[in-house]
Amino acid sequence: VNKLLSAALAAALVLPAGGAAQSANGTVGASATILAYLDVQKLADLDFGSINAGSAATLTPGTLPGAGSLGVLQLDHNAEVSLSVSLPAGGLTLVGGSGTEPKLPVSFECGYSAASSGALDAAAVSCAALPNRLGNDDGSARTSYIQIGGDIGAGDTTGRIPGTYTGQVVFTVTSVY
Amino acid sequence: VGHRVPRGLTWGLSIGLTLGLGPGLVLPAAAGAQAPGSVEIFPVQDLRFGTLPTGAAGGVDPRDASRRAELEIRGKGEYLLEVLLPAEMASPAGFTFPLGFNGGDGVLQWLKSGLEQPLDPTLPYPLDIPAQEKGVRVFLGGTALPPRDQPPGLYSASITVRVTYLGT
């Protein structure tokens, strides 16, 4: 009995020495939130060229126009993006006018493509209804293009004050992740 | 059968003594009267780089109280302090980007006096804690280096401080 009791006491006395740390580790975390990369550049303005009074003009995204030029934006992004498009209210405005002249209505059409010209990835839609650019939610880098075209009706050029009409289509591009 | 009963009682008594004496001897150390060589490390604050754009380095200075990493070491005597620095940060999806640390990314602050001195976290450091200081705080900074095409999201890493007792 005495032997067993001694052994037990010895163990008890040794324990704290073994428990007093001769070394220790401490760990803290490090964190960062990385924003998506997004760069938008205008490569070309949308230009219908010269239109005879009483004639229509059409620029179709995804096709090579016979006259004028499609508008083109280049998007470099490593996340999916959403778009908000602001169109010129009422149409294009006569340059040099008083501001009271009738505006020239335009129906804008947009589409995504993998190159700055040529075929679209999907059918063109009204620019206001252009969907999110999907497909790289894995963070991979991607370059996308938006081709911008539109229609000007023959009726809207009839009796129109001659001159240059301009307006701005503003694309607000946001990374989604 | 009669011989086995006393042995059973003896074991019961020894277990009771062990449990009773152990914590009684350890407690004074936890209260601050540490035995030589005993040391404790308490993580206080993580290193926070915040929100970073891709392609731009983001640095945290070890004197930036709101974003630096902080640990507290309590002990007395001579120790070897080592900081195990991560080479990169990782996202839950497995994407990574490099982290950078240099000789200016550490600061030691003595617990009692509040005095500070530089610490090169990239090298082992002989740390002599005088009894009156009771310990030291370790402040760590660093630089996040996300490349231009880094996938977006939350990234994390771990920094471990290891202290080994060398003597008094």
Image (cartoon, coloured by chain):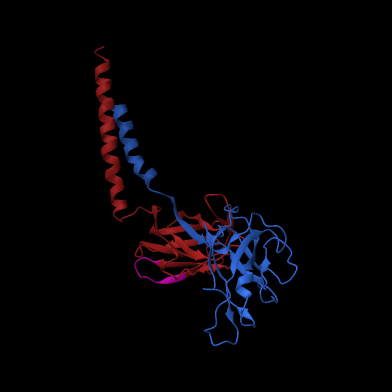
Range shown magenta: B110-117
- Residue A10 lies, with reference to residue A172, above or below; the image says above
Picture coordinates of residue A10, whole percent (x, y): 33, 36
B114 part of magenta stretch = yes
Picture coordinates of residue A101, whole percent (x, y): 55, 83
Residue found at the very far right of the displayed protein: A66
Instruction: Give whichever of A19, A106 is nearer the camera.
Output: A106
Q: Quadrant of the N terminus of chain A?
A: top left
Picture coordinates of residue A112, whole percent (x, y): 64, 59
Q: Residue at x 48, y 58 (%)?
A: A30
Q: Give the prevailing secondary structure in the magenta stretch.
A: loop
Q: Residue at x 29, y 43 (%)?
A: B23
Judge from the rendering whether residue B159 lies leftward or rightward of residue A3; answer left or right. Answer: right
- Chain whose colour in the figure is red: B
Q: Is residue B84 visible?
A: no
Q: Which tint is chain A?
A: blue
Q: Is residue A65 visible?
A: yes
Judge from the rendering whether residue B64 lies leftward or rightward of residue B10; answer left or right. Answer: right
